[in-house]
Amino acid sequence: MFPWLTWLFARLAGAWRALIGAAAVEAVARSRPRGAFGEAPTVVAGRFELGRLAGQGGMGKVYRARDLETGAPVAVKILGLSGEEGRLRFEREARLLAELEHPGVVHYVAHGFLDDGTPFLAMEWLEGEDLAERLRRAELDVEESVELVGRLAETLAEVHRRGIIHRDVKPSNVFFEGGSLDCARLLDFGVAHVGGEARPLTGEGVTVGTPGYMAPEQARGEAEVGPRADVFSLGCVLYECLSGRRPFAANDVMGVLLKVVLEEPPPLGELRDGIPESLERLVERMLSKKPEDRPADAAAVARALASLDLRPSAVPGELVAQAA
């Protein structure tokens, strides 16, 4: 076997083990009874009255709550995992959201600590559905896909301008307030990277992100990733919106990672009629294996999408039957 291929398999195997470990932690968390992380207080920080448990995972629990100062509903996220790195990631997410005032990002309300030292983060409560749910329910047309990803690119452009790399752009982290595509919000900055951090939280060989949406450099566990990693993930989202399928799919995590690193996805023109050639070429650039072959950042993607001629290169039609 070629030495570089041996190295690649070793790196991807390490990434696979890390991702399987994270998935196992989340699975255990989801199977625990309501009080497995410790019973949350009725009122957090004297301000947020907790209501129903809205969700839980490896990082903790999210409650629907009421802000006693304003009367408004809020989402309160309570950290469930112990350890310094988990606390640092949680505190960094709170800090980033506090600094990011943008209509395309979920709004920060407050953060702090419970009496036992457990961190909490309060954010605006959003009613609606995420993009993953929307794509399961109904496909998007070409214009809707371009407009949606254009708005996401504009939001990410502000994130990148502040030196932040999201590192986990995917359909389930795109939320439509009120179910409207015009009100798309970017969620979950829990694994975001901030350029110039004195103490990066992700080391060499550690994979961060979601298989099937992470860039090849993330799949290889490279310590430093830039805005072009988010461009790749955004390209995966656009590809899925246009085709109704993920660009990189396999039966297991290792297979997905190998496809991300080594294989090209099927051309969009083979999966759906009526996609403009200029749009297909842009998606191909966004999904380039080499970061330098992609648009430089989300701002470049937003400009490219805004300048597209969306007249179809073929007679408009529905998704090709084979793509179902």
Image (spheres, rainbow, N blue to C red):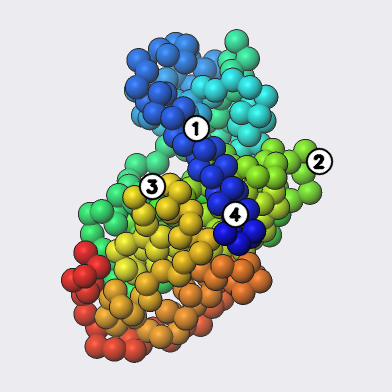
Marker disc for residue 6: 4
Marker disc for residue 21: 1
Location of residue 187 in the rendering, given as x and y in whole percent from the top left corner = 49, 46
Q: Residues within 10 Å of mark 4 (few under 14, many from 20)?
A: few
The secondary element bearing badge 4 is classed as helix
Question: Is residue 213 visible to us here?
Answer: no
Residue matched to label 2? 198
Q: Earlier in the sequence, mark 2 or mark 1?
A: 1
Q: Of all residues shown, which one is farthest toward the left?
A: 321
Name which residue lies at 40% across and 23% down: 28
Q: CA distance from mark 1 to mark 4?
A: 23 Å
Q: CA distance from mark 2 to mark 1?
A: 27 Å
Q: Is residue 28 left or right of residue 163?
A: left
Q: Earlier in the sequence, mark 1 or mark 3?
A: 1
Picture quarter with the N terminus: bottom right
Residue matched to label 3? 252
Question: Would you place residue 157 above or below residue 130 in this image?
Answer: below
Location of residue 47 in the rendering, given as x and y in whole percent from the top left corner = 52, 20
- The amino acid type found where label 1 is placed reads Gly
Q: Residues within 10 Å of mark 3 (few under 14, many from 20)?
A: few
- The amino acid type found where label 4 is placed reads Thr
